[in-house]
Amino acid sequence: MVLKVERSMEEEEGVEPVSPTGQYFNSSALSVSILGVFESEIPIEDSLTMVLLRDVFLLINPRFSSIMVKDENGVPQWRRVKVKLEDHVKTPIFPDGLSPESYDEYLDEYLSKIALEQLPQSRPLWDVHIIKYPSSNAAGTLVIKLHHAMGDGFSLMGAIFSCVKRADDPSLPLTFPPQMKVPHDKGELNIFRSVPRFLSVISNTVYDFVWSLMKSSVVEDDKTTIRSAVDGVEFLPMTISTVSFSLDHIQQIKSKLGATVNDVVSGIVFYGIQLYVQSEGSPCHASRVTALVLLSTRMISGYQSVEEMTKPDAKSAWGNQFGFIHVAVPPCADVEKADPLGFVYYAKEVVKRKRSSLAVYLTGRLLETVRRLRGFEVTAQYMHTTLRNTSMTISNLVGPMEQMGIANHPCKGLYFMMCGVPQSLTITLISYNGTLRMALGMEKGFINPKLLTSCIERALERISEAALAKSS
């Protein structure tokens, strides 16, 4: 619920319009946030964290010091306020003297709790949680919760990355894997050079756009062991589990199959989902299972530094600039007898075809048209239905190639998760320091986290074995 206030002329200077997508993500239909989880190699000193928040984080963008309000016409705006850091920093208390394995359970429960909580609208839409207890993965854990209305994963995680230093040499900048160019750039420039290519683009665009329209309105995925189809699933507790892959290992598979890292990872996800669904008794070969894959539509090539982000003309790095595509999980009558590589090749073919389509941009135009004609609340409900009608969301980001330090705390690992999404399963991926970390947000008590993570790991193992056998 966005606050409605009357503004004086003096307040107008600190007011900035909320982007359309920001309005959708903080509406009566949707309230989506992002959890960024950072695992520290050493115990966390909270006083250093407070200094970092005050002297760096708050200065990056006015949205970290703003609340969302409605003007006299009901249009959401960002309004600057004075930030009280003590209201945003939480330090939970767990029992003393427990084993790391016991603290794993406390951490899991705490993450589930804060994922479900709504950020107060009366103050800037972010919180920091400092867990000082050792888990199996870290000596301490720092969790940053940011409302999706402030920006997408790229801009919000980019803001965090701009606050940190390299652990091995703080004087050197962090480096990131090269970003793929936005799809369609080359295709749009050369679209009329080849009639077959032009016809392919038109055909794929029409098919993808119509299918997306149907999935966002009348065509709903079947109820399976990864989709409960419960109304209000976004308000139910979530369990978060993670799986780590070696990037070198993924690169080896990629090279042997002539695919991309995204092709391999998508194949692992599709195969792992099939293994899980059929092991739990769902007839996946006869079920409609669709993933909503989020894509960045930015024209910039990568993350920016604090100096770049705080420039007056740096707005291109901010906001919610992404689209989505519907990708059907390939049906399989008997997953145990299926060719594991078939899932990678399927992902490769689907991505190739989707890139020869302008449906992502047409869908964006459709949302904007609905907003102008019916308002942001109606558009937010349309997005809610789009999410609810599918079985899962898949989102990925790139992280630093070197180990980073947050306020002089070496970061051992990191992952992120979206909260408030009306689905039983959300999958996110981020690369960091030679590792690809997959996080799975699952409806608690409905999806078996241990079985699903083991199925994902088994999918990687079988795809890797099949790739090696193919090349030998």
Image (spheres, rainbow, N blue to C red):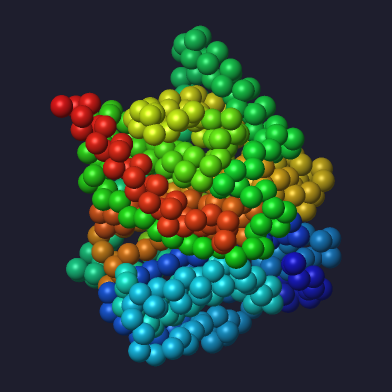
Q: Residue 235: give x, y in percent of width and height.
A: 67, 63
Q: Is residue 294 above or below residue 160?
A: above
Quadrant in which the C terminus appears: top left
Residue visible at 53% across and 42% down in the picture = 281
Nearest the eye: 250 or 360? 250
Which residue is outermost to the left? 472
Q: Quick check: can you spot residue 96? A: yes
Which residue is outermost to the top? 195
Nearest the eye: 276 or 253? 276
Residue visible at 58% across and 81% down in the picture = 83
Q: Quick check: can you spot residue 44? A: no
Nearest the eye: 216 or 273? 273
* Left or right: where 451 falls relative to 230: left
Give the quadrant of residue 181: top left
Q: Is residue 275 above or below residue 449?
A: above
Give the quadrant of residue 31: bottom right
Residue visible at 74% across and 37% down in the picture = 217
Q: Is residue 196 above or below residue 223?
A: above
Q: Residue 55: give x, y in percent of width and height.
A: 43, 79
